[in-house]
Image (spheres, coloured by chain):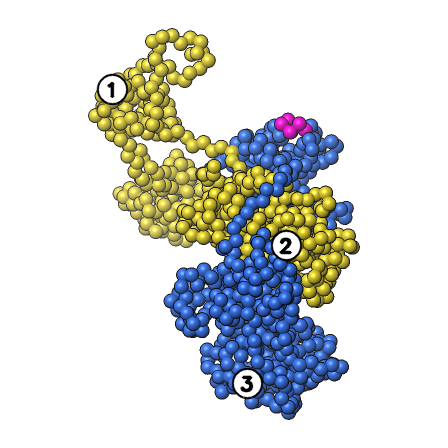
Chain colours: A yellow, B blue
Amino acid sequence: MESVQEVVEKLSPLERKIVPFLNLPIEKIKEKTGLDDTSLLRALKFLEAKGLLKISIEKARIIELGTNGIYYKKNHLPERNLLTLIENKKAIHLEEAEKASKLTDNEFKVSLGVLKSKAMIELKNGKIMLTASKEEITKKSQLALQNLKKRKDIIEIQERSVVTFTLTELGKKIAGKEISSDSIEEVTSEIIKTWKRGKKFRRYDVNSEVPVLYGGKKHFVNKTIEKGRRIWLDMGFKEMRSTYTQTSFWNFDALFTAQDHPVRELHDTFFIKDLKGQLPENKLVSKVKQSHEKGSSGSKGWQYVWDENEAKKIVLRTHTTCLSAKTLASLDIKKDLPAKFFAIGKCFRNETIDWSHGFEFNQTEGIVVDKNANFRNLLGYLQEFAKKMGFTKIRIQPAYFPYTEPSVEGAVWHEGRKEWVEVLAAGIFRPEVTEPLLGEPIPVLAWGPGFDRLMLLAHNMNDIRKIYENDLKDLRNKKVLI
Amino acid sequence: MSNLIFNRKEFESLLGAKVTKETEEKISLFGTPLERITEDEIEIEIFPNRPDMLSMQGFLRGFKAFLGKETGLKKYKVQKPEEGYTVKISPSVKLVRPFTACAIVKNLKFNDEKIKEIIDLQEKLHSTIGRNRKKLAIGIYPLEKISLPITYEARDPKQIKFTPLEMDREMDGLQILSSHPTGKDYAHLLEGKETFPIFVDAKSRVLSMPPIINSHETGKITLDTTEVFIECSGFNLDVLQKTLNIIVTTLADMGGKIFQMTLDYGNKKIVTPDLSPEKMKLSLEKVNNLLGLDLKEKDLEKLLPKMGYDFKNKTVTIPPWRTDILHEVDLIEDVAIAYGYDKITPQLPNVSTVGEESFETKLKTEISELLVGLGLMEISTYHLIKKEEAELSNLQETIETENSKTEYKYLRPNLLIPGLRILSENKDNEYPQEIFETGVVFSLDKKGKSETGVEEKENLCVITCPGNFTKIKQILNYLAKNLGTEYSLEELDHPQLIEGRTASIKINGKKVGYLGEVHPETLRSWGIKMPIAVMEISIKNLTSQN
């Protein structure tokens, strides 16, 4: 246990202020120190932490006068006024009584009612007659609390905490003492100038609680995206950007997705009402058309009649792969190869919201355009990306996408959860995609892992809705990933 | 996505082996992810490119070969058309549903389980390759109930009269669409057409009205059925034939005997089902280039039969039920699957390229860092807003998505709306709440510059709560100074802000945003009880460096 001296040295100015009065009840302390309730309670809590006293807080019901109550306390209850009036006259006309009592219409009626119900008066021929004797009047006017409660704004009953405290042994030694201190409180510029050897600083209680501090923070989604972006840049990829609204041409047709493919229906994709887009140059459009209808570079194609109007429909992009299509179309294969590009961005699908789905999601996308690129390279990039995201083991299996062949889906091993989590989707673009866009069926390695899943794993979260919730309390408390 | 659930016992007996851990892995490595396995059931996913594996028979045909059990192209015996095995196609169907491919299968032994399996296959084919019956529909009929030959024709729907499945009275074509449950589901496929297609037998009885429903009398398979007539109708004869092949080979795997039919299209006659395989050249060099492997010709001779092909003289013979082989690359993928995705070693190539971040991203990152330095919290919100939010903000123009499944329907025109939403949702959290967001906002493109008709801009929105004009202007000053931009303010009337305390921000003479105090009326409508100051500005104008 600390000595009295040590405790005294640690007392803050606020605490020192109340120590001399600690033998008094709280109301008195308030009066003597002039502190408000909050400061006083804070000071008591500090002293409690120092072992000087024990606070107990009890809920108490407190009865207070309401606005009418305060008024009636000063001017008597209306029925009392009326009674006094009648007492003096024994009988009085109603109109006269109302006038003489100076009560409002409402008060007058209530007063009559109250007096009648207590059998103190009677109404006869428009006159009020007193029926009760003096003693009865005294007895009956002890109006019960219950009755007052029913009437408007006379009394209010409130729940309140009542603070009391008891001194500990240590507290008793100090309480009531005037504590003067010449130790230094805050270090000020003045102190820096004037401090001399031997002058003491007040000791702080280093374990006492301090107020919470909230700093500014980047949203954890954007932080994780930055991390992903860093990985791509380190691996030598250039960033692609494009708009969220896209023509179906870039989102679907350029990626050899047949026009009757289910993904192109309203219940899967967000189409924008009343808008039609513009298609790129004719040469490209007719190559894509040909690719769908009869195939390109040795393909049979999908064998149907390709409709330009279908391609003009505007969608909210369903994948970042449309950025890859646009990028490929802009490349000069004689000068720009080999080339590597990436994107991380929002995509949309017409979905309801639950723990594993939402109508928005983040996707990341990478492409490698290189005449010598092959399937083993694709797996190499996937493995490297996963490794950099913190997953050392990946599992590769066959998959299907309309625009890649071969296609793969990959899972990463989550050490914490001890399970495989499907996050990677990849493949080599089909010649039906690359030939129209590049002019030659050059292999393009492409992968587009959903990023939200990786994000949830990284933050050890399970519910995808949390990504979009923006609960400031959660954001303030979210741990930073390093 | 189509998932198949197999009875494990039956599966193991047809496979001729127990399903071990190794088998489980093989199932996924075959390109049919194993979704679930219990003592009784096995559930796998079939990708949309393999409708031929939408039945246990179809899956096992492929999987057994993959395991090296029955490799190479599986041959099926097909009997030539017998007397009367003819379907006459009337020219009247050309406008409504022009093609059909038909077959007869005999020697069948049905039980409840088998009937269910066939109906399952039929429905799965409808919903995948059949595009919900739009592209193709399949009908299967008990042969003993119908009289050959059959006619495929189109008629005025009012002249079509038969009792549809699960009904007890005759209906005409229009009545079926308006009041039969299945009719209602698929009504959109025939609605507005002058004539509806029907199959009619030799006794002029209507067998079915594709792609909607069969006749109750002649179109229902029972336990007594041993012979069936099968038709596929639709718009692409090649796809119809392949689908017919999928069905008849599945029935043959159940013990059925396949018979061809003659389809009389008037100007030409064809015979279906046609199980003669297609051939495609495959170059070893291309296989090795694309996969990065060093395979030999004799490797291909081993690998391709594991995927159900024959391979001889650089030529692949393709099963007539495969609908997905459009190009050499489709065969190359199958070579990779046969080789084993798990045996292909990843190899990161040594290709030198230079990474590069886009200017927009760099700018956004810098702005965020400055604001975080001021103690502001970044938020990240949906790009769609609710209808009531659009109404609350009195938006003059909206860009609406079609058939949104949630209450979020419009593209956001600014970041103020989501910002106010977030503050109203955070009423119970501690104040001050000082937040910002950078993100895309949408408006109609009136200059015709964008290919989508929508103009997308990257905005920054800062909201301080509690906040006032001074505070928000201090933030703008801080940003402008650090980004090396000069701006001027000009008083502005903004419907949601307080007059006299709102200004537009001008940079280089161009209005690029605004700032001010939000009007109490606006705050009240959002249920916000604290004063708010806001600034929203287009990001790309915030710096002179580019």
Please tell me whether mark 2 sits on a helix, a strand or a loop. strand
Please tell me whether mark 3 sits on a helix, a strand or a loop. strand
Q: CA distance from mark 3 to mark 1?
A: 106 Å
Position of residue B31 relative to residue A5, above or below, is below
Q: Which mark is residue A4?
A: 1
Residue at the spot 46% in from the left edge and 42% down from the top edge = A474
The answer to whether residue B424 is visible is no
Pointer 2 and pointer 1 on the same chain: yes
Parent chain of label 3: B
Residue at mark 2? A429
Residue at the spot 66% in from the left edge and 44% down from the top edge = A338
Q: Residues within 10 Å of mark 2 (few under 14, many from 20)?
A: many
Depth-wise, is mark 2 or mark 1 nearer the camera? 2
**Residue stretch rendered in magenta on the structure:** B481-485
Residue at the spot 62% in from the left edge and 85% down from the top edge = B80
Q: Amino acid at mark 1?
A: Val
Mark 2 or mark 1: whose residue is earlier in sequence: 1
Residue at mark 3? B106
